[in-house]
């Protein structure tokens, strides 16, 4: 076997000259078999373009194994001693040239710390803005307990998804994703079901993004207009006093009141007609959602999303700034808590409320990463630590949600305001004139503008790839899909801009199949085929399915 370890090219001069012609980063040498061009097909006398006899022998061996069975059968795949070492792999073009495979080494993998924070950054989405509202809906004590319990439940289901490809016997699943596992166990129904419910989570997130971008753009423009025209906001009768004001946009004491911001008071140099014109053309629900079409619809039609992927770091910056903002506000406002276990008071909510399913729906989406966890973990340098790293990542995500939710709820000034005033987007509880909140809204706005095309790209790739077998079948196909996505966002932002309800419904819907039903069924079927399924495991995983169904149905009764 020593001959197999020799260079596949006769000359050692191939290194630099051909490495400049292309790269094959992150190629898996056990999946991408070497391609060989017969020496007689190579034209020219350049020794760099000659293929050695060792390469021809190796190619024959690999072709021999590949003819024994399908490439997906692990038992008869070429053994490791037949496949050359990574540094000995070359890719041959039909012209006879060759370049060395790069990137398949431990240097191309991420250490555990990077993997953990990649999962944390991926899960930290718009749901963090609704966690305080969810805790208010469930009650402070029950909300904390549900957040912890749901975090552990989602972690376990994610663990099942992560290990599901390895439980498939006699098949090479190294490049499989969770839809492939669903197709293996449930056929076409499983593949298409996982696709549909994955689309629900992605399109639901894009709708929430449109509502929030409309909100942030409106408040940002309002802040700039007020400062440019020297407009001061009067103290709302439903707002707290002091430098760190907190407002109640929709106080229950006046159900007809539907103002999202305080009534502006003009400075001596103000002009009522100009103010009226600004409010007419700068409306959170009537005009801003339409303005966003001009910016975002062309971005969705880009063939590639690589440009927007460069700005994903904005998500980390925004979340970190949001945590700093919450910490500063809580330190300045102090804690305002009273414990009323079951009865409602004027300023406080009970510790246990029947509206708790609204929190479970939000948390299902907040902890949802199941459709891409296999891909994220493939880049982990130490695969044996996958379970540990996944657990640490979930702990950090849960701690972040708990930190933001508890501090905002506890620091909300009650009295004079009721805890029921906490909005589904807690930034709406701060006035437009708040500088720190203005910075947070601006950062989140730019982050969402760059992430929105990425989400649209994922929807297009999955949907077009499954239906047409091409990620970009034509500009017309892509345009029709994007118009549908944008129209969904515009309509919701115009007529139902309640991100809490959107998040909980989309979370409970996609979580029903991708978090609870499919992972639990796959796990039980796998154990049954191995003869290892016992009744405690069957009862526990059947209970998971029932919890997913109950979580979904409960959203319609709250």
Image (spheres, rainbow, N blue to C red):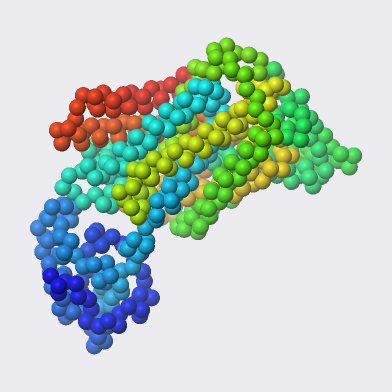
Is any part of residue 399 visible from this angle?
yes
Q: How many marks?
A: 0
Q: As drawn, which residue projects farthest toward the top?
A: 343
Q: Nearer the viewer, residue 535 or 54?
A: 535
Which residue: 40% across, 51% down? 112
Image quadrant holding the N terminus, namely bottom left
Picture coordinates of residue 139 (x, y %)?
54, 21
Which residue: 25% across, 71% down?
Answer: 88
Q: Position of residue 149 (x, y in %)?
A: 42, 28
In the rendered image, the vertical position of residue 454 relative to residue 548, given as above or below: below
Quarter residue 129 falls in: top right
Quarter of the image where one finds residue 424: top right
Tell me which corner region of the image, top left, top right, bottom left or bottom right, holds residue 5. Answer: bottom left
Q: Is residue 86 left or right of residue 339?
A: left
Q: Would residue 286 be seen by someone viewing this image from the given angle?
A: no
Where residue 532 appears, as percent x and y from the top left, is 17, 32
- Identity of the residue drawn at 19% across and 52% down: 72
Give percent across and percent down for residue 347: 66, 18
In the picture as drawn, the residue positioned furthest to the bottom comes out as 45
Front position in the image: 436 or 269: 436
Q: Is residue 456 above or below residue 417?
A: below
Compared to residue 236, the image places residue 322 above or below, namely: below
270 shown above or below 242? below
Q: Residue at x 50, y 25 (%)?
A: 143
């Amino acid at each position: 076997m020593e001959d197999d370890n020799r260079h596949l090219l006769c000359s050692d001069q191939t290194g630099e000259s051909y490495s400049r012609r292309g790269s094959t980063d992150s190629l898996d040498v056990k999946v991408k078999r070497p391609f060989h061009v017969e020496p007689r097909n190579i034209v020219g006398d350049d020794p760099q373009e000659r293929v050695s006899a060792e390469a021809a022998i190796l190619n024959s061996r690999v072709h021999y194994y590949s003819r024994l069975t399908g490439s997906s059968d692990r038992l008869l795949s070429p053994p490791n001693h037949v496949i050359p070492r990574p540094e000995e792999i070359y890719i041959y073009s039909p012209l006879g040239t060759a370049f060395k495979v790069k990137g398949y080494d431990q240097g191309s993998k991420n250490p555990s710390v990077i993997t953990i924070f990649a999962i944390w950054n991926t899960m930290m989405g718009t749901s963090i803005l609704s966690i305080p509202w969810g805790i208010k809906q469930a009650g402070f004590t029950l909300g904390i307990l549900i957040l912890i319990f749901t975090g552990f439940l989602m972690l376990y289901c994610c663990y099942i998804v992560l290990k599901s490809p390895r439980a498939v016997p006699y098949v090479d699943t190294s490049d499989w994703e969770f839809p492939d596992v669903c197709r293996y166990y449930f056929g076409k129904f499983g593949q298409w079901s996982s696709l549909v419910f994955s689309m629900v989570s992605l399109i639901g997130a894009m709708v929430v993004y449109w509502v929030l971008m409309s909100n942030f753009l409106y408040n940002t423009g309002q802040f700039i207009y007020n400062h440019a025209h020297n407009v001061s906001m009067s103290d709302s009768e439903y707002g707290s006093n002091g430098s760190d004001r907190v407002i109640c946009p929709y106080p229950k004491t006046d159900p007809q009141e539907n103002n999202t911001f305080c009534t502006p008071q003009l400075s001596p140099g103000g002009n009522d007609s100009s103010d009226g014109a600004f409010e007419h053309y700068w409306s959170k629900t009537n005009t801003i959602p339409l303005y966003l079409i001009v910016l975002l619809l062309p971005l969705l039609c880009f063939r590639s999303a690589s440009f927007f992927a460069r700005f994903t770091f904005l998500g980390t910056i925004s979340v970190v700034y949001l945590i700093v903002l919450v910490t500063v506000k809580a330190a300045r406002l102090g804690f305002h808590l009273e414990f009323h276990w079951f009865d409602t008071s004027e300023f406080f909510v009970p510790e246990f409320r029947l509206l708790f399913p609204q929190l479970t729906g939000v948390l299902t989406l907040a902890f949802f990463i199941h459709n891409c966890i296999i891909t994220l973990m493939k880049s982990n340098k130490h695969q044996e630590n996958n379970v540990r790293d996944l657990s640490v990542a979930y702990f950090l995500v849960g701690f972040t949600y708990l930190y933001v939710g508890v501090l905002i709820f506890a620091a909300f000034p009650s009295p004079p305001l009721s805890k029921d005033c906490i909005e589904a987007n807690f930034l709406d509880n701060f006035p437009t004139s708040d500088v720190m909140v203005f910075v947070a809204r601006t950062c989140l706005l730019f982050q969402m503008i760059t992430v929105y095309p990425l989400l649209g790209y994922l929807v297009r790739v999955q949907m077009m790839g499954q239906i047409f077998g091409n990620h970009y079948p034509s500009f017309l196909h892509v345009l029709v899909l994007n118009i549908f996505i944008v129209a969904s966002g515009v309509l919701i932002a115009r007529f139902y801009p309640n991100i809490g309800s959107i998040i909980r419904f989309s979370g409970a819907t996609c979580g029903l199949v991708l978090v609870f039903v499919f992972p639990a069924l796959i796990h039980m079927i796998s154990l049954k085929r191995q003869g290892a399924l016992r009744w405690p495991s069957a009862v526990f995983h059947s209970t998971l399915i029932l919890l997913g169904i109950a979580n979904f149905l409960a959203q319609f009764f709250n």
